[in-house]
Amino acid sequence: METFAIQEVGTVIGAIDRSLQVRVGSGDYAAKRAVSCLVEPELGDRVLVALHDAGCHVLAVLDREGDAPTRLVAEGDLELSAPAGRVTVTAGEGVRLVTPAEATVAAGKVRVAAGEGSLAIGAMTYVGERLVAQVDRVKTVARSVESIADRWVQRLDRAYRFIAESEQVRTQYYEVTAKAAVNIKAQATLVSSGELTKIDGGQIHLG
């Protein structure tokens, strides 16, 4: 059975839950927002209304006074798809993604370019096969740092460590090789071994 609709221009005069109250030339009606009308109507908006036997629907928001933000709202899930192209979101004053649930990014490659960045995460886990970082300067402040690795290699021009209290090294084999000199200064120096202590050099000075 065919259903004919009459289109009129009206004004939103109220909203209760998902129902809108619109006023057109023929009277006031309770209307639903059409699925194709993604812009959420606000009070005072001029809207295009379709009147038909099954009820009344707001088809589009035509005009809005003031500078209230435009909200795109969908009842239920919303998908943006461009199977043969790309999707670009452009904003002059910023972009925000807000959700109390999980946000997921799945892509073959992810690139982020910014002049300045900030990241605040309560707990973070990184799992990957390789991590390469090239930076000019790194500063880390932490109450506790623990590193576990099968192999650790550092290549530095200069290294400085300032330890306020104590340092302990526990290893099966410990070797220090210096091309020029090794200088150890302390109020007291204790060297002990269970079997053998050997000092070998061209000259040995004690005292």
Image (cartoon, helix red, strand yellow):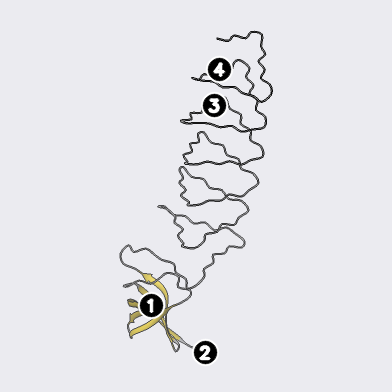
Q: What distance separates the C-alpha of mark 3 from that of mark 1?
A: 66 Å
Tell me which numbered mark, 1 or 4, is placed earlier along the sequence.
Answer: 1
Q: Position of residue 33 (x, y in %)?
A: 43, 77
Tell me which numbered mark, 3 or 1, is placed earlier along the sequence.
Answer: 1
Secondary structure, mark 2, is loop
Tell me which numbered mark, 4 or 3, is placed earlier along the sequence.
Answer: 3
Q: Name the front one of labels 4 and 3.
A: 4
Q: Position of residue 120 (x, y in %)?
A: 46, 49
Mark 2 crowd level (few <14, some 14–19, many ≥20, 10 Å Cα): few
Secondary structure, mark 1, is loop
Cβ–Cβ below 8 Å for labels 2 and 1? no
Residue 19 position by quadrant: bottom left
For badge 4, the amino acid type reads: Asn
Q: Name the front one of labels 3 and 2.
A: 3
Q: Which residue is mark 1?
A: 17
What residue is at 52 percent from the left and 59 percent from the top?
A: 103
Q: Which residue is mark 4?
A: 183
Q: Which residue is mark 3?
A: 159
Which mark identifies residue 152?
Answer: none
What residue is at 56 percent from the left and 32 percent from the top?
A: 168
Determine whether, in the image, residue 105 is placed left or right of residue 194: left
Q: Position of residue 122 (x, y in %)?
A: 47, 52
For badge 2, the amino acid type reads: Glu
Q: Nearer the viewer, residue 94 or 172?
A: 172
What residue is at 48 percent from the left and 36 percent from the top?
A: 139
Q: Which residue is mark 2?
A: 2
Residue 26 position by quadrant: bottom left
Q: What distance separates the C-alpha of mark 4 from that of mark 3?
A: 15 Å
Q: What distance separates the C-alpha of mark 2 from that of mark 1?
A: 30 Å
